[in-house]
Amino acid sequence: MRILAIETSCDETAIAIVEVKKSGKGDTFKILANNINSQIEIHKEYGGVFPALAKREHIKNLPIIFEKTLKQAKIKIEQIDRIVVTTGPGLEPALWTGIVFAKELNKKYKIPVIPVNHMEGHIFSIFPKKSKTFTVNINKKMFPMLSLLVSGGHTELILVKENMKYKKIGQTRDDAAGEAFDKVARMLGLPYPGGPEISKMAEVERGNLIPLPLTKGEAGRGFPKIKNPSSILPLVRGGGAQIQLPRPMIHSKDYDFSFSGLKTAVLYLIRDMKEKDSNILQNDKIKQKIACEFEDAVVETLVCKTIKAIKEYKIQTLIVGGGVSANTYLQEVMTKEIKKLRKSDFLNIKVHFPSKSLTGDNALMIAIAGYYQTKNKKFAKRMSSIKAEGNLSL
Ligand code: KG4
Ligand code: ZN
């Protein structure tokens, strides 16, 4: 089966084509093409995604990326068996562009269209690795499964007792984790998207990265990683004035999150610091300290709640997905805590993160989720029932 997937839920116009074959080992996916066109540079000057602009860019880019993707896959549209498209959650004007595009293809070529939940896509994003071919073998041993989905719009803990049966056990009550990263970055005068920027600053503070002036080849790739951090930069945490931020709801009985108070705490901290020295944020060292403590607070909260849920639901597989899952420190702390669990009752628990290129929004993850929707015959039969749902839930 050949699947063409379309993703336009936010600021990435993405189209992928995969070919899926069943084998004794599971479902083997061959990536024929996978294109992502990011609008980040356009939205940067607004400090976040501007929906009307995202819609305009998707409309402009979709036909171009569509032609490019078919060409790369070396197939004609008539050879596609299914079109899968993200219908939510996301920005509705942006979602509609992909849906309308899919519906036009359906009208012209009579190819069935399957709606896909963007968050389900993030769950399936962990399967592709470096090679063009990968096999998905979902078996009983993997369940119960837990998915921590952390992106610009969502922070959710999803319990998966069997394949594609989802129960949301926790979510953010206000800002999403990625949103908090973006807003705090803005307060520190860092560009959008803020997650990677904060992360780089925090890593310098931890002594894992050193902010050397970038050489030409390194520009755009961030700070160079250093092999033996402590030999070059002493760990500076604890030295001088210690910055402390709250870990909201970390000990609450439920699995919900809240990041808005943390963001406000950073705002007040900066305000108080500026009262004493209005140029304080010109000092990179201070920014690194704030970034580090903020990242610590977010990561500790996410990890603590996830571990608690793993214990309660006797989880066998943990999947971390969404833009924030790219965060090095989150990956490091989560992996460490899972290792500790393995030594206790959770011998076989496995943790999966998407490969770096698939942590953010992409159409490949939508193609995989769409394939399993097709398999489960859960797809809509009438085209008119396929619509954008900004708040679609799993
Ligand atoms: O999943 P995604 O690409 O788009 C949404 O569906 O929202 O997530 C984007 C979010 C942004 O808020 C961005 O700042 C955050 O993911 N992000 C990160 C990192 N890379 C991206 N947050 C923390 N650390 C990172 N390394
Ligand atoms: Zn996303």
Image: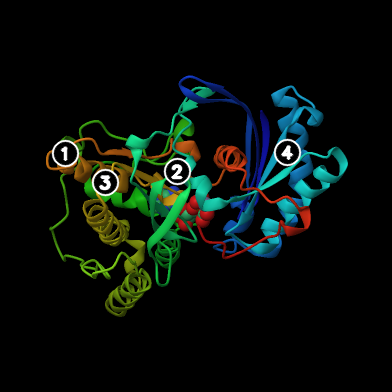
Q: Mark 2 or mark 4, which is nearer the start of the sequence?
A: 4
Q: Are marks 3 and 4 in contact (CB under 8 Å)?
A: no
| Residue 163 tag number | 2
Q: Position of residue 35 (x, y in %)?
A: 64, 36
Q: Mark 4 or mark 1, which is nearer the start of the sequence?
A: 4
- Closer to the camera in the image, 232 or 308: 308
Q: Residues within 10 Å of mark 4 (few under 14, many from 20)?
A: many
| Label 3 sits on residue | 334
Amino acid at dot 4: Ile
The residues tagged by marks 3 and 1 sit, at their Cα atoms, a distance apart of 22 Å
Q: Position of residue 268 (x, y in %)?
A: 32, 77
The N terminus is located in which quarter?
Answer: top right
Amino acid at dot 3: Met
| Label 1 sits on residue | 230
Q: Mark 3 or mark 2, which is nearer the start of the sequence?
A: 2
Q: Are marks 1 and 2 in contact (CB under 8 Å)?
A: no
Q: Residue at x 26, y 46 (%)?
A: 334
Q: Is residue 306 left or right of residue 320?
A: left
| Residue 65 tag number | 4
Q: Kindly report which numbered mark, 3 or 4, lies closer to the viewer in this rendering.
A: 3
Callout 3: helix, strand or loop? Answer: helix
| Residue 301 tag number | none
Q: Residue at x 32, y 60 (%)?
A: 287
